Image (cartoon, grey):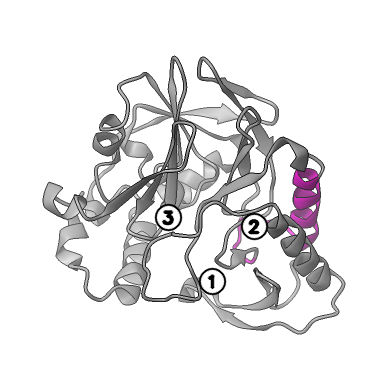
């Protein structure tokens, strides 16, 4: 991990109301800390590049439950910092091959340094090469409720970005923590572990059926795309209108009525296509996969 001095500028922590904090990992990804009367819940562990437990303990001393929205290394890469983590049952295999894999960590760091050349790569070499401590993974499935004392969060399975994607619904305060299924950045549906666009549509429709239970969406990524100078995830919260725009965008892709623009991600994944509608942006397989 990076040293304490670097870590002090790595995290940006913002209270978002009702004892919830957004923890921004240098604009790369968002974790959330939800504090209840008896326990606290950490949603996603980020990249694992800096000491997340230390930041959490600055905010609460309550017993901590840790969960992942899905198995990608920017969301589950810090799992090794905690003795046990609840993970989507359909993504547990993905975590072994992706989030915990040294080669994937190195590729991920390459992409971060390319986008942020001012960062000192040497500070992260230990993170890239270290053997990570084992973390006990416990299964998360549809309908489970996480009790925090005076509030509870429900697990909702919403496959799309990955097969195991889940969201966490705090219906008491009408908050939805959606991971990478809803974001201001491009939704990636072309990865090997992604589902079809049609399945993504079903997941959005499932959330829309429950929109009366939430009015604020807290995503895994929320950059201000109109201001590239702002490196942080500053567009919080998202409104439920994002769901409608993402659904319309996905349906236009699924019906074949649009011709997407070429979208480049990491070279290992090859090219994809991207379609935009309103604020929505979705990248999907260039051939097949829908």
Using the image as rendered, state which of residue 19 and residue 253 is in the foreground.
19
- Looking at the rendering, the stretch of residues picked out in magenta corresponds to 190-208
Residue at the image position 84 percent from the left and 77 percent from the top: 256
Residue 290 in view, yes or no: no
Please name the residue that numbered disc 1 is placed on: 269
Callout 1 environment at 10 Å: few (<14), some (14 to 19), or many (20+)?
few
Q: Secondary structure under badge 1?
A: helix
- Residue 246: x %, y % from top left: 72, 62
| Magenta segment includes 143 | no
- Characterize the local packing of mark 3: few (<14), some (14-19) or many (20 or more) Cα atoms within 10 angstroms: many
Say which of 232 and 137 sits in front.
Answer: 232
| Residue corresponding to mark 3 | 29
Of mark 2 and mark 3, the one earlier in the sequence is 3
Task: Residue at 41% x, 76% y: name it.
Answer: 228
- Figure quadrant of residue 102: bottom left
Left or right, residue 4 beside residue 220: left
**Mark 2 — residue?**
194
Q: Quadrant of residue 82?
A: top left
Which SS class for mark 2? loop
């Amino acid at each position: 991990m990076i040293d304490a001095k670097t870590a002090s500028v790595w995290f940006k922590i913002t209270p978002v109301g009702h004892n919830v904090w957004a923890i921004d990992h240098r604009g790369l990804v968002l974790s959330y800390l939800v504090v209840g009367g008896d326990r606290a819940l950490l949603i996603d562990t980020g990249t694992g590049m800096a000491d997340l437990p230390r930041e959490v303990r600055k905010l609460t001393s309550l017993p901590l439950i840790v969960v992942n929205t899905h198995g990608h290394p920017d969301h589950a890469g810090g799992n090794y910092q905690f003795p046990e983590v609840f993970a989507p049952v359909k993504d547990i295999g993905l975590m072994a091959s992706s989030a915990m894999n040294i080669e994937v960590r190195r590729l991920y760091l390459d992409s971060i340094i390319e986008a942020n050349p001012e960062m000192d790569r040497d500070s992260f070499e230990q993170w890239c090469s270290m053997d990570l401590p084992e973390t006990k993974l416990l299964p998360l499935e549809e309908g489970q409720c996480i009790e925090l004392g005076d509030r509870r969060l429900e697990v909702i399975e919403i496959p799309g970005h990955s097969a195991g994607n889940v969201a966490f619904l705090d219906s008491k305060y009408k908050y939805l923590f959606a991971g990478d299924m809803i974001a201001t950045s491009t939704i990636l549906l072309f990865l090997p572990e992604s589902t079809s666009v049609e399945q993504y549509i079903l997941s959005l429709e499932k959330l829309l059926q429950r929109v009366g239970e939430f009015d604020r969406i807290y995503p895994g990524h929320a950059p201000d795309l109109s201001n590239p100078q702002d490196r942080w995830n500053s567009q919080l919260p998202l409104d439920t209108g994002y769901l409608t725009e993402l659904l319309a965008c996905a349906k236009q892709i699924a019906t074949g009525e649009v011709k997407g623009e070429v979208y480049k991600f990491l070279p290992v994944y090859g090219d994809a296509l991207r379609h935009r509608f309103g604020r929505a942006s979705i990248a999907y397989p260039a051939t097949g996969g829908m």
